[in-house]
Amino acid sequence: MNAAFLGLAFIAAMNPKLLALDLLLIDNERPRLMFLCVLLGGLSVSIAIGLLDVLVFHADAVKSQGSISAGLDLGLGVALLAIGALVATGRLHGRRRAPVPAGAGAGAPVKTESWAQRVLRKPRFGLAVLIGAVAGLPGASYITALHQLVTGTSSTGAQAIAVLVFAIIAFLLVIIPFALLELRPEATKANLRHTQDWLTSHARQLMAAVALLLGAYLAISGLIRLS
């Protein structure tokens, strides 16, 4: 493990989908078990794929993964850069809500929950494991980190430990709220809801920033692996 490897792990950890998942799970009737199921599914898949690469398939599998995904990453990166630029300049707007008629008062419709909020309101442990497993599938940063491992000079044991470290760092946005739920449940829920409110009020700026950063990373990563 080196600074580049750890940097890739923390890039993987900055996943807005995991934070959105936290905000959905926190309102579940049994949030601790749901968080645990997500972690079990995600870490199991992430660690299993990494160990298979470094212990069984070694560099050939990583080269195969890179050649297949490099073009997709480049295309997705360019698309995200375009979307980020449009959002940042205000040329791409979300659908505006219809104004509430004056005098609607108490009869005005209440903001409805999303499909994900309704589904994840009840404990659904199998679904949580599946969501975690999907989140644990390797992305561009993980594939690049595995390539560094198998083409380096580290021992097999060190490579296996590095896979475990990467998976844990990549899921910090789920691990930290899960740990805080055990220590300070009410404060954790309040902080996550405050974070949700802040994210909602800064949605356009954050969407543009994430799209531009992730698009640049994917485009550069794809170009490097295609060269």
Image (tube, grey):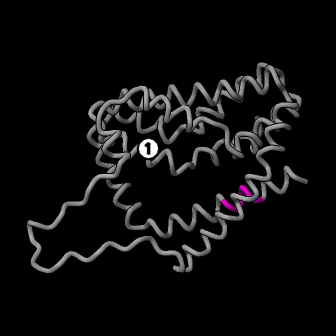
Q: What secondary structure characterizes most of the magenta part?
A: helix
Where residue 199 sits: x, y (%)? 41, 60
Q: Please state the horizontal and vertical placement of residue 146, each as a whole percent of the image.
A: 77, 35
User: The residue under label 1 is which amino acid type?
Assistant: Leu
Magenta segment: 215-219
Image point (34%, 40%), residue name: 119
Closer to the camera in the image, 173 or 4:
173
x and y percent of residue 126 in the render?
43, 26
Residue 45 in the image: above or below residue 139: above
Residue where numbered disc 1 is placed:
21
Residue shown at 44% from the left, 49% from the top? 20
Left or right side of 41 for 112: left
In the image, is residue 158 above or below residue 193?
above
- Image quarter where the C terminus lies is bottom right
Give the farthest residue toward the right.
Answer: 227
Residue 211 located left or right of residue 62? left
Q: Badge 1: how crowded within 10 Å, few (<14), some, or many (20+)?
A: many
